[in-house]
Image: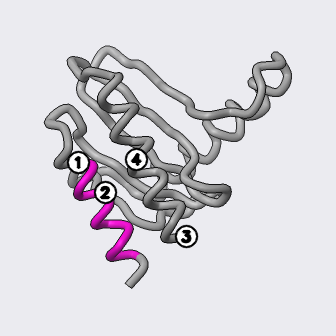
Amino acid sequence: MREQLLKSILSDLNGASADIEASAIISADGLTMAALLPQGVDEDRVGAMAAAMLSLGERTARELARGELEQVMVKGDAGYILMSYAGRDAVLTVIARKEAKLGLIFLDAKRAARSVEEIL
């Protein structure tokens, strides 16, 4: 039941913008809780990488006195990966096209993260 609710949030998120290609909700320890990823993408690998990136981001923010980590963004020549907390125990990962309007993606991701936090 909970997985279906989480997938529903991801479906709404992916449908909110044509620039969002995929999304996933990952536990803080790297296990995929729900995902809408392209075929051929390994959910376990995405989960492990997102958890590692957030852990490194937390440490970097702390060491450089930037406060509590809110999100990590990776920009590549083919697009963006945005990772942000959805409560204390989950991470929302969004994969967006390179033409994405980031302000809208951030807004939609923030709303989705709040919905995930309410469920968990």
In contact (CB < 8 Å): disc 1 and disc 2:
yes
In contact (CB < 8 Å): disc 2 and disc 4:
no
Foreground tag (3 vs 1): 3
- Check disc 2 and report the residue beneath it: 10
Q: Earlier in the sequence, mark 2 or mark 4?
A: 2
Circle 2 packing at 10 Å, graded few (<14), some (14-19), many (20+), is many
Which span of residues is magenta-colored? 3-13
Q: Check disc 2 and give the amino acid type.
A: Leu
Regarding mark 1 in the picture, which secondary structure is present there?
A: helix
Q: Is residue 22 above or below residue 96?
A: below
Residue 111 numbered tag: 4
In contact (CB < 8 Å): disc 3 and disc 4:
no
The main secondary structure of the magenta stretch is helix
Query: Mark 3 to mark 1: distance in Å?
Result: 20 Å
- Check disc 1 and report the residue beneath it: 14
Q: Check disc 1 and give the amino acid type.
A: Asn
- Check disc 3 and report the residue beneath it: 120
Query: Mark 4 to mark 1: distance in Å?
Result: 12 Å
Q: Check disc 3 and give the amino acid type.
A: Leu
